[in-house]
Amino acid sequence: MTRLVPTAVLAAFFTVLAAVSASAQSIDETINGLFASSTGWFVNLIFSNFPGTTFPWIVGWLVVAATVFTVYFGLIQFRAFGHAIALVKGDYSDPNDAGEVSHFQALATALSGTVGLGNIAGVAVAVSIGGPGATFWMILAGLLGMASKFTECTLGVKYRNEYENGTVSGGPMYYLTKGFAERGIPGGRFLAIMFSIFCILGALGGGNMFQANQAHAQLTNVFGEYPGFITGVIFAGIVFAVIVGGLKSIARVTEKVVPIMGVIYVGTALIIILMNYDMIGWAFGQIFAGAFTGLGVAGGFVGALIQGFRRAAFSNEAGVGSAAIAHSAVRTKEPITEGFVSLLEPLIDTVVVCTMTALVIIITGQLMSDPDTGLYLLNEAGTAIRTVGDNSGVALTSAAFSSSISGFKYVLVLAVILFAFSTMISWSYYGLKAWTYLFGEGKGKEITFKTIFCIFVIIGASANLGPVIDFSDAAIFAMAVVNIIGLYVLMPIVRRELNSYWSRLKSGEIKKYT
Amino acid sequence: MSEKFVVGYDGSDVSKRALDFAVARAKAQGGSILIVHVLEWSPYSFLTPQEIEERHARRTEELERAETALMAPLKKTISEAGIPIDTQIKYGHVAKTLCDIAKKEGATQMVIGRDGDGGLSTRVFGSVAGSLVQVAPVPCTIVP
């Protein structure tokens, strides 16, 4: 008798599910239509081109900034690389500070916020629209981005707020206000407010909807079609349990499993690349040739460049300001040390992980080309390269991995869900920091934001990829517009810190603890 | 040269027995006691953004709690017995931290407890005893 009860409950559940599925398809469409029509203007503004060109001004904005910081700090990404590794290893950490947040922990947490779907789905989008050449520009953007990250994270630590109860809050909103005030330049408060608004949108977009959307895409890819609404509700429920219910156990498990997943992902990619070692030379040939000629992709080499830069920025978030929030709680007397550590982030995220994904897609021959001309074949709409099985986004990466190691799609679905989840947890935190900066601290205010965040998980899983990816990119790049203005104004402060620290390091005043 | 005992202490029954043992020896030989409480901690563990934000506050709390709940009562009773006593609270890998302190403070002996019956805390403490036996820089007594 008692066994009948769960069976009856299950039966009822499936009846309800079936009914929900039928109507959910139309719910999906309604959400999608509403979403696309309400965010279109914002997307158009951010992605408008330089007058008379097809080059989006925002991409230029990010690359110019990264280049300026690279030159201004004298190729800091290469100069300080060894020192950054030593800092992460803990060579310069005072043993008496044990028990505080270490450089390694700050880096690992920031990385679990950035290593996510951008590395899996974003790269697939970049190479399918921009061709293999996009990889070259992506790597270059990653290397330059290290200098942007260095600048913002140093400022994040330097101008953080330390409260009496010992907690810390940092990020662009704090260095924009305090740093501008220190230099006697007006407008800091205004920029901080703008940044906070965009950060909330970015948290809801790239940090949330894009993740939910691609997690759902991967689930349907493996387990068959079903309404996104259902994935959304389940995801939202778990996220709610963690960020509102304080279910730390789930977050803790994710934080531990995500790095392992990252290693498995890169390891598998390496195995596939080595299995096709005879193709490595050819793949790099495609990447270099495509970088400067486009090899027939839509928009030619400019198309490759735009896609490469755009996906790199979306993936490693250099110049966006989010990392400055994540890194600001580290325990250090020298803010600059966290800058050094943070420059490893774009390197790991973009130069290593993203490149792996791109190489696997190229080497396994997912992109279809004309055997006679060597140029890539475009799809019917002429917007992207035709792929084997017409895949895009995360499905393309999944197909590439599975073509060499069948069954890897099941590992990938787990990776995607975990990456999506850890990115959501990180961005819910960034969004919350921006929210409390605008509206003040307080339990009720925090719960309001967290609830909105969960609702957007459902919207993200239900909407189509197109409008979601556009809005996500637009919101995150809007953060970069404000943040980089701040970085230009405050970069002399970072250089002063750098010169002082570097001379003390060289003179032996700053020593290793052994 | 007078004996200096480093005692690993975490408030458990076994660690109390270890401390009693060390106190008795110190009294007989005219030595001093250094009680060390190590909070297990790795700088390479993974934390959520929320935990990172609160870490400094938590650490302060943990240190205060260890001082008032564990160390303060001991200091009182043992110094009343006329034995010179000092205490330290540290974060880190338990066995490694104990060894580092023993070396740094010039201890002549280490004493820790061991509980042979396999609960969770015992497992942790037992493995500490196991590794100390292998790496201790000074003679090490393990009290059952």
Image (tube, coloured by chain):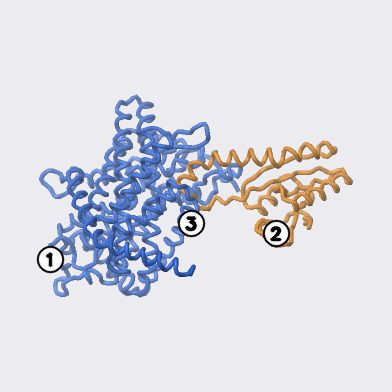
Inspect this view and state whether residue A201 appears. yes
Q: Residue at x 60, y 45 (%)?
A: A95
Q: Nearer the viewer, mark 3 or mark 2?
A: 3
Residue A253 numbered tag = 3
Q: Please provide percent x and percent y for residue B92.
A: 62, 49
Q: Earlier in the sequence, mark 3 or mark 1?
A: 3
Q: Which mark is residue A28?
A: none
Describe residue A178's horizontal placement relative to residue A35 as left or right: right
**Mark 3 on the same chain as mark 2:** no
Residue A412 x, y percent position in the rendering: 37, 66
According to the picture, the residue beneath numbered tag 2 turns out to be B126
Whether label 3 touches label 1, CB < 8 Å? no
Location of mark 1 (residue): A380
Q: Which shade of the palette goes to chain A?
A: blue
Chain name for mark 2? B
Q: Is residue A356 left or right of residue A26?
A: right
Disc 2 is placed on an element classified as helix
